[in-house]
Image (cartoon, rainbow, N blue to C red):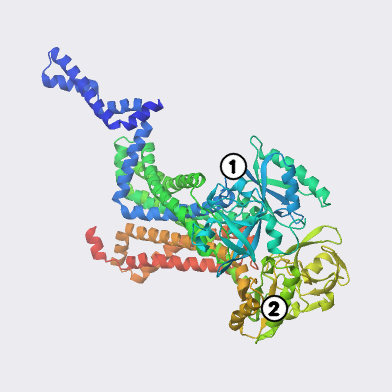
Amino acid sequence: MIVRRLQYWIHRRRRAAALREEIELHVEEKAEELRDAGLSERDAWAQARRLFGNPLIRQEESREIWIARYWSEFWQDLRYGVRTLAAKPGFTLAAVLALVLGIGVNAFFFNVYNSLAWEPWAIRDPQSTVQVLQERHSGRWSGFSWPHFRYLQTNVRSLAGLAADSGINMRVTRGESIWDGEAGAVSGNFFDLLAPGFALGRGFLPATAEVVLSHDAWLTRFGGDPQILGASIELNRRRFQVAGVATPGFNGATINRTDMWVSAEWRDLLLAGEPRLDSDSTCCLSLVGRLNPGVSREAAEAEMSTLHAQYLESVRRPPGRLLLTEPSFLANPTRSSQTRPFFLIVAVASLLILALACANVANLQLARTVARRGEIALRLSLGASHARILRQLIVESLCISAMAGLASLAVSQWLPDWTFRQLAGPQDRLTFQFANDTRVLLFVVLATLIAALLSGLAPAVNAIRGAAAGHLRQGSHSRSSGRMRAMLLGAQVALSTILLAGTALMVRSIDRIRHVDIGLPQEKLLVMSTGFDASGLPPARARALLDSLMERTATLPGVESVSLASRIPFGERCGGSAEDPASHERIPVTMHEVSPNFFETLRVPILLGRGFTAGDSGRATVILSEAAARRFFPAGDAIGQTLSLARPSQVVGVVRDFGTADFGSEHDVYQVVESAGRCNNLLVIRHAGRAAALLAELPKQAYGLDRRFILFAVPYSSVVAKAHHAVDLAAAIAAVLGGLSLLLVCVGIYGVAAYGISQRTRELGIRVALGARPARILAMVLRQNLRTVTIGAGVGILGAMAFGRLLRSLLYGVSPSDPAALALTIATLLLMSTLAVWGPARRAAQIDPAITLRHE
């Protein structure tokens, strides 16, 4: 059956011609019989045709044997729909563009989510590859220490291999070229397990100072030199030879852009800092394994969980869970939970945009089917069924949606990558691969079908009802169509109100963040990262250089104070934990190693106790933030108490909370810096208004001491701005979605108003002829159209309040039902709606009754 129908489609023209010839042959044979019976030539042919029946019906009956009648009719409807749409290019273009906005936005965000959640890293055989995670006491899922990895690698049997990767910063030198790069310190089996091959050369050999370059670094940093193999480069003043170049796109088991890879055995020599690789306090190695043939991920996870528990018991650490997941970014439960609210909000907003676009196109379709009611009534009178007419109109909607779907596929292919390049700053080292895979294709097909039904079903049903009621009763049908257009417009306004309210809430939230008092003089502070955590210097030498750099910096003109810190608010965090004295539970805290004059440099007051002194170096003393003091000592007696960190430490002071917009770091614990190598080493410089001169002079002072400094000196305000990048991105997305919704609703309002006036031209002409002034006509048209807008906005406000609760996790200092945001939404919507109606209303007021009545 299937083969026969397929053959029909291939040879349908030849079969149709043969069928016509066969029908003529049957008629001719019958006519010959009748002539033999005594009828004349003319009567014989006439009688033969009457006996045979309608040739077209017989052709249809014969074709049903070769192919189902439904598909034959669908093909006819499709061709007719394409011709009809081609005859109205203006309508077709407007409808396709509206649906491209709706489907394209959804395809764009789905492609982004697909790449993060389901698209595996560019590694060899990702289907049998798993990433291994362990749950920390803070509830976060992260990596492992090197001894922990070695224990799992040695004892696991369900995996064919287990590899480790740890990112480290590098100062790369080749000849006169010096640049800062990101390297991966990996286990020896890393490339054997993950790499699909090499563009040049091979992986590194054991106990050999060799490096493998990424393909991107080879092209951008080394000019794609094919003679790079065997060349010498310096990494943190250590000489390495280039052993190979990875294949294009290979980045290991991470989305952080990696410039090169070295064997983990060289990690301690390159960093020359504490803790060493063989220490159990190192963190956090990313582990990736490959399943043995026939072993499920669940079975491998059960075995590794047992080994994980045995190792934790051997090092006297609390028990914890272990997880094996797919090799993708959002497979990490911590990342997934952090991004889930954002993607949920974006998904809801994107679906609202799609519904708004479908309502817009439905209004266009409704106006068009009203104009075609005569054609539909004629087809019904000739015997066409309601189902056939409905199918014809739905097929036309499907053609429009299909064109929009194809355009949306192109949008989802190039727009995510282009957007990421525009939004990513020079400090962002993330790599994403966006591609239209099978999931994206199926999603676009599904969105296209849904758009075709949402935008075409209601207008088609309305058109058939109107035509069935009788072509002569056009007034009743026009009123019915007008009510439906008003309902669709009200739905558009309601949906747009929800999206605009979300945009207003995000803008208000960003404004609050921008103007919050963080308790620090941003304009008077500079921050310089020294990079000693990746300098390759021994800790004692690094600390001596830091002291010398601080002394030199303090003598520069305009410098009022210089202090050292491992972290500052809005900078990269240095995590830790403290034991709750009441529950003995380990609580996540943000650790700061600071020099004694840190609080004086930042002008942050000590509320209780005292600040640090030079005598606190080497002693177990800490200062707590107000929030940390309330958390660990709610009775208010923090001074003199003992807080268990890495070791028991005495609380000597409580400092005022500052950096209050630095989300997630309320529990701050400060201790005197003892080494150079823990987290980042930052110089915090308070100056008297000579920022530009200092930013130019600081590198000279540092490089005069040692060329291994990896400097990054910026105003503190830029550090704060970088920390706000995520909320800025969320606000930008909200603004784009809100702007699209406003554009669609304004186009819909304009279209409904213009069409309504074209239908009422005779009425308006009579009103003018009877003495109605243009201002009165203008006010009437505005009032009638804005009434629908007002009702839709009122319904939308209720939805906006519910949507605001969904946005709660992204808002700062703003209520989900913030009156100012809702008022701004209504004012914007009414203003833009008035502008959209103004043009058609002015044309209505300028109607010449003489010309109108003459045409009538």
Please, what secondary structure does the residue beneath circle 1 have? helix
The one of 134 and 837 positioned closer to us in this rendering: 134
Please identify the quadrant where the N terminus is shown. top left
Residue furthest to the left:
40
Q: Is residue 518 left or right of residue 624?
A: left
Q: What residue is at 74 percent from the left and 40 percent from the top?
A: 303
Whether residue 520 is visible, yes or no, is: no
Please identify the quadrant where the C terminus is shown. bottom left
Question: In the rendering, at what x and y percent does residue 359 appear?
Answer: 45, 53
Residue furthest to the bottom:
557
| Mark linked to residue 127 | 1
- Decide which of tag 1 and tag 2 comes sooner along the chain: 1
Please, what secondary structure does the residue beneath circle 2 have? helix
Nearer to us: label 1 or label 2: 2
Quarter of the view holding residue 681: bottom right
The one of 702 and 663 positioned closer to us in this rendering: 702
Vertical position of residue 212 compared to residue 64: above or below: below
Q: What residue is at 37 percent from the left and 26 percent from the top?
A: 4
Question: In the rendering, at what x and y percent does residue 237 appear?
Answer: 64, 66
Question: In the rendering, at what x and y percent does residue 682 appear?
Answer: 69, 73
Q: Which three-letter amino acid code belongs to the residue tagged 2?
A: Leu
Question: In the rendering, at what x and y percent does residue 25 appear?
Answer: 20, 21
The one of 64 and 299 positioned closer to us in this rendering: 299
Q: Is residue 431 left or right of residue 141?
A: left
Q: Which three-letter amino acid code belongs to the residue tagged 1?
A: Gln
Vertical position of residue 367 compared to residue 782: above or below: above
- Spatial CA distance of label 1 from label 2 is 51 Å
Q: Is residue 833 left or right of residue 616?
A: left
Quarter of the view holding residue 709: bottom right
Q: What residue is at 13 percent from the left and 20 percent from the top?
A: 43
| Mark linked to residue 73 | none
Which residue matches tag 2? 549
